Image: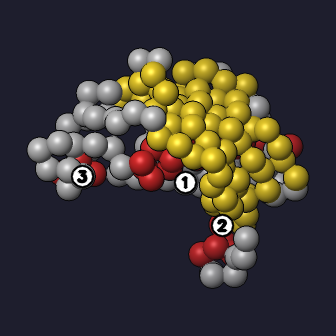
């Protein structure tokens, strides 16, 4: 599975500047996804984290990994993301569903990520029970481990989230 940035926008509800995946370079719908994020000097977080020594915040690395896991789940269409989502839209804007964090476990950071680095983001869906799933994730730069962990997500109705009616 390869997806351009435009195709990623069809699967995720995220939009710039919070879209943290540039493209998908490999994967198997509903099972795993490998994406990349090229870190640029003008990425919004580098101006304040930290001036003179820019470092990508760890929470944003985890968010990039969560977006990668969401692509893996959403790319499978309705058999993975509850009824009502379409294969064209997955869990993104046209599917009526949205993926939310339900938990973050065993996350460890092993390398600083700076402007000029290319993050390789990997996510493998290891369990799905109804609308809740778990993914093992890792981020590397030139083969060096930057971050690893496990993420839990819940695929919920976007309208319910907008109305403040969703509990995880």
Q: Quadrant of the N terminus?
A: top right
Residue 85 horizontal/vertical position (percent): 76, 52
The residue under the point 68% across, 38% down is: 136
Give the quarter of the image for residue 123: top right
N-term-proximal mark, 1 vs 2: 1
N-term-proximal mark, 3 vs 2: 3
The residue under the point 69% across, 81% down is: 165
User: Disc 1 to disc 2, how far (Cα)?
Assistant: 10 Å
N-term-proximal mark, 3 vs 1: 1
The reply to whether the C-beta atoms of the residues labelled 1 and 2 are less than 8 Å apart is yes
The one nearer the camera, 72 or 153, is: 153
Residue 149 horizontal/vertical position (percent): 61, 42
Residue 68 horizontal/vertical position (percent): 58, 39
Which residue is denoted by mark 2 in the rendering?
158
Which residue is denoted by mark 1 in the rendering?
13
The residue under the point 64% across, 73% down is: 161
Q: Is residue 136 visible?
A: yes
The reply to whether the C-beta atoms of the residues labelled 3 and 1 are less than 8 Å apart is no
Q: Quadrant of the C terminus?
A: bottom right
Indicate whether 123 appears above or below 150. above
């Amino acid at each position: 599975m390869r997806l351009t940035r435009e195709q990623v926008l069809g699967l995720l509800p995220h939009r710039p500047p919070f879209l943290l995946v540039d493209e998908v370079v490999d994967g198997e719908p509903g099972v795993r996804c490998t994406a990349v994020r090229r870190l640029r000097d003008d990425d919004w977080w580098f101006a304040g984290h930290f001036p003179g020594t820019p470092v990508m915040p760890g929470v944003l690395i985890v968010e990039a990994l969560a977006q990668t896991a969401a692509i893996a789940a959403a790319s499978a269409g309705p058999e993975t993301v509850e009824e009502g989502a379409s294969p064209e839209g997955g869990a993104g804007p046209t599917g009526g569903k949205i993926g939310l964090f339900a938990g973050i476990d065993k996350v460890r950071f092993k390398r600083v990520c700076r402007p000029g680095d290319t993050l390789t983001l990997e996510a493998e869906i290891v369990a799905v029970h109804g609308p809740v799933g778990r993914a093992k994730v890792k981020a590397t730069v030139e083969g060096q481990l930057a971050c690893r962990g496990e993420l839990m997500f819940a695929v919920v109705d976007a309208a319910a989230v907008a109305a403040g009616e969703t509990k995880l």
